Image: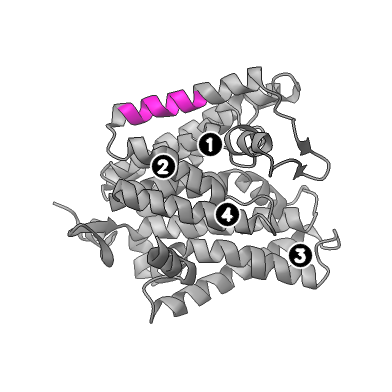
Amino acid sequence: GRTKAEEQSYTISRDTIVKGKAVMRIEGLDAARFLAFCGMVLVNFRIAAQVAPGPDIASALTNALEGRAAALFVVLAGTGLALARPTPGLVLRRAAFLFAAGLVNLAVFEADILHFYGLYFLAALPFLNASGRRLWAGIAAVLAVSLAGFFLLDYDAHWDWDSLTYSGFWTLEGFLRHSFFNGWHPVFPWMAFLLFGLWLGRQNLQSRRFQLLMVAAGSLAAAAGMLPQHAAADPELAFLLGTGAIPPGPFYILSAGGSAAAMAGAALLAVPALERLRLLPWLAAPGRQALSLYIAHILIGMGALEALGMLSGSLTLQQIFWISAAFCAGSAVYARIWAMPFRHGPLEALMRRLA
């Protein structure tokens, strides 16, 4: 009963087989994952280059993506789990791989998200086959625990906000606090994004009606989450009403979760047009290599900026924006060429071999 456009909106990947069952791969979600990667590059390059936000369009776009691009990544990770239907053992092995890779990455990039992914996957094990009602109950529980933490614990502990550095991470207390409460992407409340993605992956994502619903409902949630923003100027209410990723209050989760759903829905709706323009392979290929590109944007992208002495605040907003855009374009070209002879990106292939 699908239309031709809907039929073209997904493919059955040759290599995604779990216990003899073909697993749906929706290329629109791969494209959305690449867009999330581009957003992360814009944000991380600007922060690394110590460029202050400004009034121009490039800065406004980067500001809008801060905390949203990473949230879209996590939502799509949950959607991928739902579509792939992995065994608990496979999820556990992937969690161990990502956690270990993240700890190594922490040596060069303190805002690493990979080790958090390992924790998200571990926490997702009881929800792999959960009903929709149980998933939403899990989201509510995660948000409740997170909110309780704001009242019972000191969110500022270990942070030096002037330099955005976190001391004591390698102590047991610092590791637990950073991982589950006040780190860059703590399990509470970021686990809510993964559970929401699991719920999304159970829906009829190839339905144009549901795609439109994702855009409409997601946009409405994103806008609703921004409504109390003016009241967040009061420091006493910032953790509760703020929409920034640090601290990640309930309205940030609502707003970022809504924008993630809207972006994913828009990417799915755009698939027929992208196919007509022959752009879909150029967006989907890098989306399937997000792990490799994430590490590349740190080691190669930020590494090159550091080697050239560009991480000392010497760049303008426009310069770092176009450097980021060029890196994203180069990533798309690389991924498209790599995908011609190889099914998986370098680190994706390594993860499949080891885990």
| Residue 343 drawn at (x, y percent) | 36, 73
Q: In this view of the protein, can residue 349 be seen by the observer?
A: yes
Q: How far apart are labels 4 and 1 at the CA level?
A: 15 Å
Above or below, comparing residue 306 to residue 175 in the picture: below
Question: Which residue is at the front of the view, 249 or 144?
Answer: 144
Quarter occupied by the C terminus: bottom left
Q: Are marks 3 and 4 in contact (CB under 8 Å)?
A: no
Question: Which residue is at the front of the view, 270 or 354?
Answer: 354
For mark 3, what is the residue?
319
- The amino acid sitting under disc 1 is Val
For mark 1, what is the residue?
187
Residue farthest along the front direction in this orientation: 172
- The amino acid sitting under disc 4 is Gly
For mark 4, what is the residue?
102
Above or below, comparing residue 235 to residue 317 in the picture: above
| Mark sitting earlier along the chain (4/1) | 4
For mark 2, what is the residue?
215
- The amino acid sitting under disc 2 is Val
Q: Are marks 1 and 2 in contact (CB under 8 Å)?
A: no
Residue 289 falls left or right of residue 148: left
**Over which residues does the magenta segment extend?**
134-143
Residue 63 — which label?
Answer: none
Q: How far apart are labels 3 and 4 at the CA level?
A: 29 Å
Q: Residue at coordinates 59% horizontally, 26% vertically from top-left?
A: 227
